[in-house]
Image (cartoon, rainbow, N blue to C red):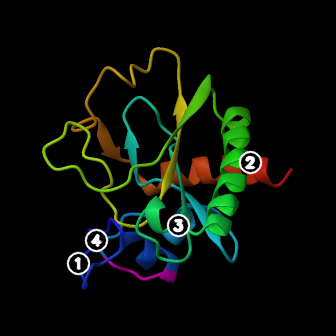
Amino acid sequence: MFNHAPVDYFCLFCSLLAGEDDKRVYSKPADIIYQDDFVTAFIASHQLKNNPGLVIVIPNEHVENIYDLPDELSAKIHQLEKRLCIAVREAYPCVGNVIRQHNEPIEGAKCKGQDVLHYHLQIIPRYSDDRMYEYAEDGERYLMPEDERRQYVELLRDKLAL
């Protein structure tokens, strides 16, 4: 319906799911917290400076945005979202979380909207005095080292196993 990906679009998330070793893909299979036949959750390679531990939930099937997301798949994503939100609160020293999901890129906007054209939902931990809504996203994201991401993966895997 409202799609923007060109015919030859290289999807970072589909590449991750396929286990491809491509230098354009910063997320690695070791970042995956949870995966079943329908959905996958992983620690984001790029984190917000004051909100470390951001989790991304995606459908395993390539769906560009919410406009094309089948209801059954949406239900599975949101069931996992709830479990992960609880796990984040139990595992991190955060005081809450924010759920964020963008549809379509927004050229020229301060917050650019959807930057990977594969539906994804972000679970962002909130910390006291994180100033999340005071700073622009540009320049406030950083590539979290793989070994640091592993620590978050293990924390959340342990909590999901309960």
- Tell whether position 57 is magenta: no
Write down the residue under mark 1. Answer: 6
Q: CA distance from mark 1 to mark 3?
A: 18 Å
Q: Amino acid at mark 1?
A: Pro
> Residue, x 43% and y 64% (percent of image)?
27
Kindly identify which numbered label has been placed on residue 159: none
Write down the residue under mark 2. Answer: 83
Secondary element at tag 3: loop
The correct choice, above or below, for 128 with respect to 122 in the image is above
| Image side of residue 8 versus residue 100, left or right | left
Q: Amino acid at mark 2?
A: Arg
Secondary element at tag 1: loop
Q: CA distance from mark 3 to mark 4?
A: 25 Å
Of the pair 112 and 4, the residue shown nearer to us: 4
- The mark nearer the N terminus, 1 or 4, is 1
Q: CA distance from mark 1 to mark 2?
A: 34 Å
Of the pair 147 and 120, the residue shown nearer to us: 120
Residue placed furthest toward the top? 129
Write down the residue under mark 3. Answer: 69
What crowding class fits label 1: few (fewer than 14 Cα within 10 Å), some (14-19), or many (20 or more)? few
Q: Amino acid at mark 3?
A: Leu
Q: CA distance from mark 1 to mark 4?
A: 17 Å
Check whether the beta carbons of the residues at disc 3 and disc 2 lie within 8 A of each other: no
x and y percentages locating residue 122 in the rendered image: 50, 47
- The mark nearer the N terminus, 3 or 2, is 3
> Residue, x 65% and y 73% (percent of image)?
38
